Amino acid sequence: MQYFVYLIPLVLIALALGYSQVVRKRVQNMSPEEAAQRFHDFNAHYFDLEDNEQVVGAWSGVEFQQAKSAVGHMASAALNSASAAVVGVSTYVPNVQVGLTSTGRVLVSREYSELGQRGNFKQVMALGPGTKAQSAEASHPGENMGSPPKNPYNPLVALEFVQLRAPSGEVYEAWMSPQGGQVGRDGFSSILQALA
């Protein structure tokens, strides 16, 4: 009887692999139009889209917050600890979602918490067509942007600093995962490549 306990993880792994193969087959059998619609449906809830606008690219990340000095880090940590103890609230770095639309707009949606519940997103910026993504080296030459935070989406993949710059001059900075997706592209896509 005790040997069956050791078989449970193996059975779960086999089920997961089987399920992933079934899903992969379904995706491979989709028409490009159906795949594009499913991609849009999966990501559209993060953004305020205009009529007939589709999400054609999506990337996840963490909001960039200026690096602090060692003293600033210690003071911030002490203040966060005190506020968590007194009020029962802790601070966190919000996750962000960036979407590229069929009209060329780049939309930024930021996470917020509601009654202590994370995972709510609201669009905070809409950058016009022609927006470019730049790395830390290109946007802040010679500056140290600090260490990237842990990737909440895949801890095995490091986040990359990205500055989004619209033709109007608007700027948004974040730590983004290079594992984004675009309609019509196989595999993962970095926002730095997609909006070069």
Image (cartoon, rainbow, N blue to C red):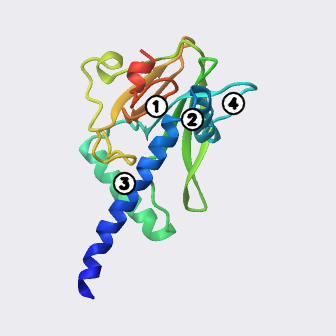
Residue ID for mark 4? 49
Mark 4 or 3, nearer chain start: 3
Query: Mark 2 is on which residue type?
Result: Phe
Identify residue type, mark 3: Leu
Can you identify the residue that label 1 sits on?
A: 181
Name the front one of labels 4 and 1: 1
Neighbour tally class for label 4: few under 14, some 14-19, many 20 plus, Cα within 10 Å = some
Q: Give amino acid for label 4.
A: Leu
Dot placed on the residue nearer the N-terminal end, 4 or 2: 2
Residue 196 position in % (x across, y down): 41, 14
Question: Measured from the top left, where is residue 193 in percent x and y?
Answer: 39, 19
Q: Secondary structure at mark 2?
A: helix
Q: For the residue carrying disc 1, how many other residues have a C-alpha within 10 Å: few (<14), some (14-19), or many (20+)? A: many
Q: Where 17 falls versus 144 (above or below)?
A: below
For the residue marked with disc 1, what is the amino acid? Gly
Task: Single out the mark in the foreground, 4 or 2.
Answer: 2
Pointer 2: what residue? 39
Residues at circles 4 and 3 in contact by the CB criterion of under 8 Å: no
Give the mark, 1 or 2, whose residue is nearer the N terminus.
2
Using a 10 Å C-alpha cutoff, classify the residue at mark 2 as few (fewer than 14 neighbours), some (14 to 19) or many (20 or more). some
Q: How many marks?
A: 4
C-alpha gap between disc 1 and disc 3: 22 Å
Marks 3 and 2, how far apart at CA: 22 Å
| Closest to the observer, 136 or 178 | 178
Residues at marks 4 and 2, CA–CA distance in whole angstroms: 14 Å
Residue wearing tag 3: 17
